[in-house]
Image: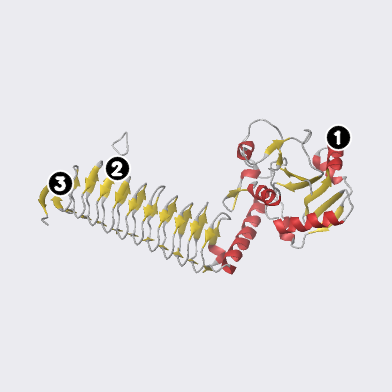
Amino acid sequence: MDISIVIVANAEGNAFNSNSSKYLHPLGGEPLISYPWQLAADLSEPPPLLLVNAMAASPLQTWAAGRARCVRWQDALPLGETVLLLYGDAPLLRATSVRAFLTNYEQHAVSAMNLVSGAGCVAQLLTATRFQELQASEESLDAGLASLEATLVTLEDAREGLRIHTRVDLSRAEKLLRQRINMRWMLAGVTLVDPATTYIAPTVTIGRDTVIHPHTHLRGKTTIGMENALGPNSIIDSCTIGNRCRVTASVLEHAVMEDESDIGPFGHLRKGARLCRGAHMGNFGEMKKSTLGPGAKMGHFSYLGDTTVAANANIGAGTITCNYDGAHKHPTEIGKGAFIGSGSMLVAPVKIGAGATIGAGSVVTHDLPPGSLAYGVPARLKSTKKD
């Protein structure tokens, strides 16, 4: 079928009582408009047309750049033989339902067909000729479609037909979407201890035998492997998590956890943080743009910024890498098997050699060679271990 898809996104109104377009309000962590757009992408390769109110620059048009061509109702549009109208405020419509609707349309010699639910029309098919006749009538799109004689097809699941006119509708859609996503993952082999308090974005993927505990939010393009234990009370946003990892009451953003690593409770991995295989980050720790090497441990109340920690090093409680001098960020390197005593401050840029030991409460301002011992404020080199 030679088909053009038009997503109708020109019904802003003011029921949202918002300064933002209702089509950009988040649903499941993604803009409302992204759901019909993804549906269109699943159905047809050419990008859809996005019918908007005006062509002046707007956040909605900014979102559409590279995804859809913005048009107005009275524009001359490049159309195939058949036009499929989807609605930007109908996020729950499934591709399977629309494909069945397309098959029904092909089997009947009609010029217009509406897919309806108890809440009204949720999609429409009509010939390009009928669509152009509506445009030429000088009526609004809504008025033209209301007067259009069309064959009716009813959705099997009326919940798919929910249209978002108010924030109350948005909350209903959020609940239905969450139930749909959670059901899919449970059937795929993921345990959700309490689905009612588990929030998984549609862009997340999860491996089997992973257990997700209550009040856990999985957001963005997060990829999770197998046999993990996540939560409770955790937020994981746009992260990659390997297999057999543990996250307890922690926040992770744009970070990586390799196999058998763990964090928490109350840990924070910021953008660019990586826990290598078997690494441990304990309570009230924070990492930014840093790597904790294989088997390395960072137990309590520590901060690593712009830092590389090699394998099996130990970061004592209260250790801080002082990476910012007020103008620039500087790196810290901690070698394999190094031992950093509690309460130490490493003033970057600085390199701690493999196997070096730093006494508790030290302030390190200079590089330390491998196997050395240093302590004090400022830290002074006391000895170097002999081979």
Residue type, label 2: Pro
Mark positioned earlier in the residue sequence (2 or 1): 1
What residue is shown with label 2?
Answer: 331
Question: Which residue is at the front of the view, 201 or 17?
Answer: 201
Q: Quadrant of the C terminus?
A: bottom left
Q: Secondary structure at mark 2?
A: loop
Q: Is residue 323 left or right of residue 58?
A: left
Mark 1 → mark 3, Cα distance in angstroms? 82 Å
Q: Quadrant of residue 182?
A: bottom right
Q: Which mark is residue 136?
A: 1
Chosen colour scheme: secondary structure
Mark positioned earlier in the residue sequence (1 or 3): 1
- Nearest to the eye among marks 2 and 1: give it: 2
- Nearest to the eye among marks 3 and 2: give it: 2
Q: Which residue sits at x=72%, y=35%?
A: 71
Q: Which mark is residue 379?
A: 3
Residue type, label 3: Ala
Q: Secondary structure at mark 1?
A: helix
Q: Secondary structure at mark 3?
A: loop
* x and y, in percent, of residue 154 in the image: 81, 59
Mark positioned earlier in the residue sequence (3 or 2): 2
Contact, CB < 8 Å: mark 1 with mark 3?
Answer: no
